[in-house]
Image (tube, helix red, strand yellow):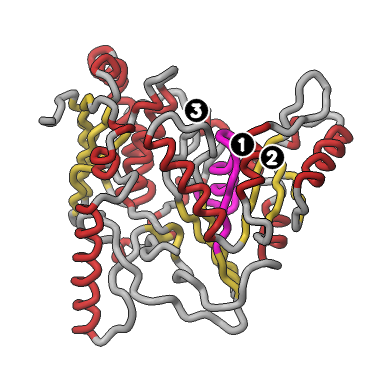
Amino acid sequence: MPASPASRSKSARSKDGSRARTAARAPVRAPGRAGTIALLGRPNVGKSTLLNAILGERIAIVSHHPQTTRDRIAGILTRENTQFVFFDTPGVHRAKSKLGERMNELASAAAEDCDVVLFMTDADVREGKAPSIREEDRTILASIPENKPTILLVNKIDRVQPRALLFPFLEAYGALRSFDAVVPVSALKADGVERILTEIAKHLPEGEHLYGEEELSDKPVRFFVSEFIREQVLRRTREEVPHGVAVSVDSFEEGPKVVRIAVTVHVAKDSHKAIIIGDGGKMLREIGIAARRRAEQMIGQQVHLETFVRATPRWFDDPARLADLGYIEGEKGRTKRRSAARKAQQAKAKKGLPGRAGAPALKTSHVTPQSTQATKKDAQEKGPTEPRGGAGKTRSNARGHAS
């Protein structure tokens, strides 16, 4: 269970955009239900798209590249006396790096720790033949504890024609495992969302809400800013470039009118820097402008975004680099987290407030109406242009930081 939910109000964000701590579990009407739900599946089956559809907010980035999701991201939905805490996990795949191993570990841990598992696959129909079960799906299913409530979600059902082709497919899955429910869905069209929530609620334990009613995620705003940058890189690059990209937030300074953010885009090879920067810096400007727009929508303020590019060879196989980038927690990160927790607890004690202190980072008030309009056109975005009288500024810089 995460110790630091993300906030949905400006006042809840820390000035440097760093992760903050929750004060205490929110009071809830009795009786209530609350629990955690793991979204499991192989890459590119639509887990992040489904999470966005369930929440009604586009917090998880999506792209046509596999392994877009690298972290375990919580999406929190509260409906009256029931709270659903969804964990979007990385797609389970054959790992070729330490980053890949860590991604698979996150998915496996989610299956063990959560109250309910949503196992998601897709109906891959070819030449009018019935869909078949992939070997990766068999492996993932075998890793889910037998006593864990598990719901089978079959995505992209709108592609199956005639629908009768689904029946042998579902029967084959039923022979592998006894599912608590089977729900055909179309994540892109949000078809089947209400049925999913109804089935999950049957298996959530009774108890207090795990987060406040306004909580949207357990991640801080600065995490989403880095993801917005990476999303734009994924949309504009091909082959090995997107898999070798990571983004770090170097500074996050909140002012009364403008939030100033500096980020570094790390690439795996020196040759990839030229691709990210583009001719005359065009690519990097487009990436920065599009990411800045999304950041402004989420934060609700003007954003000045400064973007640097740096070659960090084989960062995805270096534990120290992975820790610096936030993919694993090193000793430095643990020390910093403990220190922040102690200071927050002391501050709470002075005010006579109970529980663990700190402000969560992402709340619904961070998400403006524009950011909820995740349309198909937006998903196929080709490259934005600077709006007339742009609300903020984007500065792109190809300068590398010292190694």
Instruction: Residue at 34% x, 59% y: name it.
Output: 361
The numbered mark, 1 or 2, whose residue comes first in the sequence reads 1
User: Percent from the top left, x then y, of residue 391?
Assistant: 28, 41
Instruction: Residue at 41% x, 34% y: name it.
Output: 231
Residue with the mark numbered 1: 45
Q: Quadrant of residue 385?
A: top left
User: Percent from the top left, x then y, of residue 72?
Assistant: 45, 49
Toward the left, the furthest residue is 402
Cα distance between the residues tagged 1 and 2: 7 Å
Contact (CB < 8 A) between labels 1 and 2?
Answer: yes
Callout 2 secondary element: strand
Callout 3 secondary element: loop
* Residue 311 in the figure: left or right of residue 103: left
Callout 1 secondary element: loop
Contact (CB < 8 A) between labels 2 and 3?
Answer: no
Q: Amino acid under label 1? A: Val
Residue 155, labelled with which disc?
2
Is residue 42 a member of the stretch shown in magenta? yes
The magenta region covers: 36-57
Q: Quadrant of the C terminus?
A: top left
